[in-house]
């Protein structure tokens, strides 16, 4: 589903700092994102950086920092891309996200996946099941999170769930997010079977991830929706684009040197604002209605300002800076 005529592309900033961050640095980038006119500020949910041997990396907790940003920003939507479902119990995560949603006045979105970084889990003492088990647990977690959010408080018998990996017994006081029926859920990835099937059931937005045939991934997701009787156009489709934009070639190359890995650089939009704009429009032509500009140097606030001034106006619809989201 390409953007509708006149709608433009929702432009968001995704922060994944090369060497980690302090909260003050994250806040400065979020405020710069808001000031530049972007629709949302998202952050990764990692405790390791792109280089697991980087001893200078400073981890911060995704949802703790989003809670802080919820009180210190005014307009931008906030979220994770993506939260590892292996990090937190589903009932606890449902409560955390609902709390941040209330703190933000209903501006939060939950990007969530199975988790993939085995070494990261080992370094922080968290279990890392097999791929199949992670998907099984992921499905149960989504059933619990959405079930809790959709259950009216105080009513009998409350919300219960009896699965292979998780059990919830008669919760009559479920977390209550501000958004109705609940914060948008973002699911994505490159897998051809279980990921699109789970997304078809639970996602408000399907993220086609990075690289490869984006158009085909969206088509697979669309067929998964149709298989369960869902209108594929109910869900948004998004893409991630690493970016290094410069007002001249040297500036673009300097920013490209900060990008986390060779794979990311191979997929990145590196160059002038016009070249970055062309890449974003190309993603729109492939079916994306939302693009996350992947930023690695969180201290380079001039980068955000340049993207906001020279790219954003050319890819978004006139005055289309949403404060809500399609759920």
Image (cartoon, helix red, strand yellow):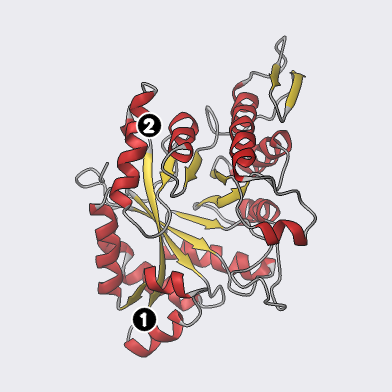
In the foreground, 55 or 311: 55
**The residue positioned farthest toward the bottom in the image shown:** 250
Q: 315 left or right of 86?
A: left
Identify residue for label 1.
246
Residue placed under numbered mark 2 in the picture:
224
Q: Quadrant for residue 51, please give it.
A: bottom right
Q: Nearer the viewer, residue 124 or 131?
A: 131
Residue furthest to the left: 5
- Residue at image location 69% in from the left, 73% down from the top: 57
Q: Is residue 311 above or below residue 162?
A: below
Horizontal and vertical percent for residue 124?
78, 58
Query: Is there a contact, CB below 8 Å, between mark 1 and mark 2?
Result: no
| Of 133 and 7, the residue lying toward us | 133
Is residue 317 visible in the rendered image? The answer is no
Can you say which quadrant of the picture contains the C terminus? top left
Quadrant where the N terminus is found in the figure: top left
Residue located 56% across and 73% down the image: 298
> How many callouts does the rendering have?
2
Task: Name the residue furthest top.
Answer: 156
Locate residue 98: give its quadrant.
top right
């Amino acid at each position: 589903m390409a953007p509708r005529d006149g709608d433009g592309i929702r432009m968001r900033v995704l922060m994944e700092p090369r060497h980690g961050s302090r909260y003050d640095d994250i806040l400065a980038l979020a405020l710069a994102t808001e000031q530049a006119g972007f629709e949302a500020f998202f952050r990764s949910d990692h405790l390791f950086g792109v280089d697991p041997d980087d001893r200078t990396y400073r981890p911060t907790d995704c949802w703790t920092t989003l809670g802080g940003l919820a009180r210190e920003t005014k307009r931008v939507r906030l979220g994770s891309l993506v939260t590892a479902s292996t990090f937190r119990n589903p009932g606890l995560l449902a409560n955390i996200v609902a709390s941040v949603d209330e703190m933000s006045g209903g501006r939060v979105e939950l990007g969530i996946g199975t988790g993939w970084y085995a070494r990261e889990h080992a370094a922080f003492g968290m279990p890392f099941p097999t791929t199949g088990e992670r998907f099984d647990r992921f499905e149960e977690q989504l059933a619990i999170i959405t079930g809790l959010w959709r259950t009216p408080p105080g009513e009998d018998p409350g919300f219960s769930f009896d699965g292979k990996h998780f059990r919830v017994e008669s919760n009559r006081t479920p977390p209550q997010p501000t958004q109705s029926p609940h914060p948008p859920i973002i699911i994505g990835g490159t897998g051809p079977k279980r990921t699109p099937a789970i997304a078809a059931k639970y996602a408000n937005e399907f993220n086609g991830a990075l690289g490869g045939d984006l158009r085909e991934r969206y088509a697979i997701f669309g067929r998964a929706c149709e298989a369960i009787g869902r209108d594929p156009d109910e869900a948004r489709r998004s893409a991630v684009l690493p970016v290094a934009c410069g007002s001249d070639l040297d500036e673009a190359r300097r920013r490209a040197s900060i990008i986390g890995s060779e794979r990311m650089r191979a997929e990145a939009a590196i160059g002038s604002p016009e070249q970055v704009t062309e890449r974003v429009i190309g993603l729109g032509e492939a079916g994306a209605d939302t693009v996350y500009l992947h930023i690695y140097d969180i201290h380079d606030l001039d980068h955000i300002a340049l993207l906001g001034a020279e790219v954003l106006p050319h890819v978004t619809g006139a005055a289309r800076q949403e404060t809500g989201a399609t759920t």
